Amino acid sequence: MDPQEFIDRLYLALLEQGWTLNEIDSMDVIYYLHLLRRKRGDEKVYIDSIL
């Protein structure tokens, strides 16, 4: 998945949950990814491997 596709999917998922564009733009995306990883219980993933 290319970086733009990842960002598009992230934004669409958050918008479906009721977030606003301003809220998404002002959030700490790195910490959000950390929380998602914790929720899933996956092994450690680095941002370089996602982007």
Image: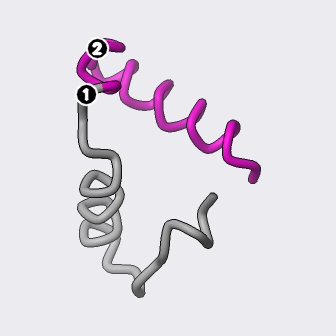
Left or right of residue 42, residue 36 in this image? left
Prevalent SS, magenta region: helix
> Start and end of the magenta stretch?
1-25
Task: Name the colour scheme.
Answer: one colour
Q: Quadrant of residue 36?
A: bottom left
Q: Amino acid at mark 1?
A: Ser
Q: Quadrant of residue 4?
A: top right
Residue 26 badge: 1
Q: Quadrant of the C terminus?
A: bottom right
Mark 1, Cα crowd under 10 Å, few <14 / some 14-19 / many 20+, is few
Residue 22 badge: 2
Q: Position of residue 35 (x, y in %)?
A: 24, 61
Query: Disc 1 and disc 2: Cα gap in Å?
Result: 6 Å
Mark 2, Cα crowd under 10 Å, few <14 / some 14-19 / many 20+, is few
Residue at the right extreme, as displayed: 2
Q: Residue at x 25, y 66 (%)?
A: 39
